[in-house]
Image (tube, rainbow, N blue to C red):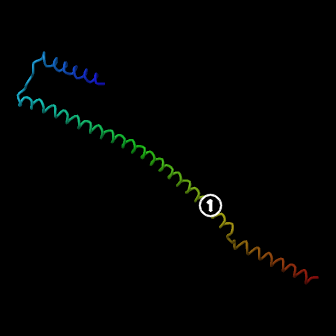
Amino acid sequence: MKSLAIILCLSSLLWCGAAFADEPLVCFPDSEARQMLVPLEQGATEKAQIDALNQQVSALQAENVALKQQNDLLKQNSDLLKENAAQYKELLQVQRDSYESIIKANKPNPVKEFFDRLGFVGIGVMLGIIAIAL
């Protein structure tokens, strides 16, 4: 392990020495360095803004998908409620017809009752006439 550390230290010294040996050292005045640094900083800021906007777009797309699913569920629920209302209306109509037929069947008919009673009276009178005649 120690030998690996020694080899790494020596190789880093060789690379550093080779890097500065052939190329001249470039220096800029402060004003030029500031002018170069401003666009770099703006680029980093814009990159951060782009990343934030991309995250917002992703969140909005996910919310859009969720809202579409919710809308579909609400449409299905609305269709089911309409179907239930139609079935309930049909059931009420059948019930109404049934009640009307029961009321009509049980409603007393005064003309029929009169002839029924008259018939019993007529039979009584005929039996009375027969009984008197005999």
Q: How many marks?
A: 1
| Quadrant of image for the N terminus | top left
Q: Residue at x 68, y 69 (%)?
A: 106
Residue type at mark 1: give it. Asp
* Horizontal and vertical percent position of residue 93: 58, 59
Q: Quadrant of residue 130?
A: bottom right
| Quadrant of image for the C terminus | bottom right
* Horizontal and vertical percent position of residue 94: 61, 58
Farthest residue to the front: give it. Answer: 2
Left or right of residue 73: residue 90: right
| Category of crowding for the residue at label 1, using alpha-carbon neighbours closer than 10 angstroms: few (below 14), some (14–19), many (at least 20) | few
Which of the two residues, 15 or 118, is positioned nearer the viewer here? 15
Which residue is disc 1 drawn over? 97
* Horizontal and vertical percent position of residue 37: 12, 31
Q: Residue at x 9, y 22 (%)?
A: 26
Q: Is residue 60 above or below residue 34?
A: below
Which of the two residues, 67 or 105, is positioned nearer the viewer here? 67
Q: Residue at x 91, y 84 (%)?
A: 132
Which of the two residues, 48 or 62, is positioned nearer the viewer here? 48
Secondary structure found at label 1: helix
Farthest residue to the right: give it. Answer: 134
Q: Residue at x 69, y 74 (%)?
A: 110
* Horizontal and vertical percent position of residue 62: 37, 41
Left or right of residue 90: residue 68: left
Farthest residue to the bottom: give it. Answer: 132
Left or right of residue 8: residue 62: right
Left or right of residue 72: residue 132: right
Q: Is residue 107 above or below residue 10?
A: below
Q: Quadrant of residue 38?
A: top left
